[in-house]
Amino acid sequence: MIQELHKHSGLKILSKNAQEEDIRRFLEEVSRYTEQGDKNNADAVLQVSVLANQEIYKAIRRDLGMCEALKELMKDEMDKEIEIRTEKIVQEAEKKVQEAEKKVQEAEKRVQETEKTKKNTMQSNLTNLMENTGWTREKAMQMLGISPAE
């Protein structure tokens, strides 16, 4: 008779008022499952049960043996979730790297434009000085403080 009562622990844990003993019994039972289909079915039952009985599961999580049974049962789902989250993080990081590279290119372009403007301004000033004073290029460069190498 007792064995008959324990037989339906999967159904018992679906209610909002599940008993901790029934949940523990179910976890012990499903921890021995080896077939993926059985694990998937047990996982579906657990998802509903956890939502309905969160406080009991918090207490069970503190029990390392039960926690390990839950981890083993949900290992595939946890691994998949970790993989999905990792891929999302990698994609976000790659996007940020691309954005940063684009900003660096834009900054380099602005620096080049600034240097070009600076050079054009210096050449224009040099030409104006030469035209207005009659100085040679070398004299005008000396007066503007421009080294011959520039």
Image (spheres, rainbow, N blue to C red):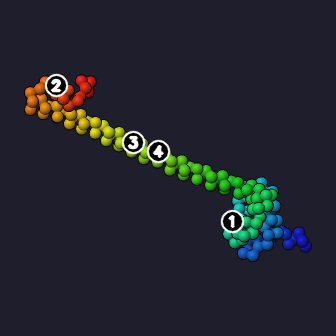
Q: Are marks 2 and 4 in contact (CB under 8 Å)?
A: no
| Residue 8, image quadrant | bottom right
| Residue 21, image quadrant | bottom right
In front of the other: label 2 or label 1? 2
Residue 79 visible in this rendered orientation of the protein: yes
Q: For mark 4, does the 10 Å Cα neighbourhood hold few (<14), some (14 to 19), or many (20 or more) residues? A: few
- The number of numbered badges drawn on the structure is 4
Q: The residue under label 1 is which amino acid type? A: Gln
Residue designated by label 4 = 97
Tell me if 116 is positioned left or right of 31 in this view. Answer: left
Q: Earlier in the sequence, mark 1 or mark 3?
A: 1
Tell me if 87 is positioned left or right of 121 in this view. Answer: right
Residue designated by label 1 = 47
In three-dimensional space, the C-alpha distance between marks 4 and 1, rounded to whole angstroms, equals 38 Å
In front of the other: label 4 or label 1? 4
Q: For mark 1, does the 10 Å Cα neighbourhood hold few (<14), some (14 to 19), or many (20 or more) residues? A: few
Q: The residue under label 3 is which amino acid type? A: Val
Report the front residue among 34 and 25: 25
Q: Are marks 1 and 3 in contact (CB under 8 Å)?
A: no
Q: Secondary structure at mark 4?
A: helix
From the top left corner, tell me how far across and down residue 85 is, in percent. 58, 53
82 is higher (above) or lower (below) than 122: below
Residue designated by label 2 = 139
Q: For mark 2, does the 10 Å Cα neighbourhood hold few (<14), some (14 to 19), or many (20 or more) residues? A: some
From the top left corner, tell me how far across and down residue 100 is, in percent. 43, 45
Q: Secondary structure at mark 1?
A: helix
Residue 104's disc number? 3
Q: Are marks 2 and 3 in contact (CB under 8 Å)?
A: no
From the top left corner, tell me how far across and down residue 7 is, in percent. 83, 68
Q: Secondary structure at mark 3?
A: helix
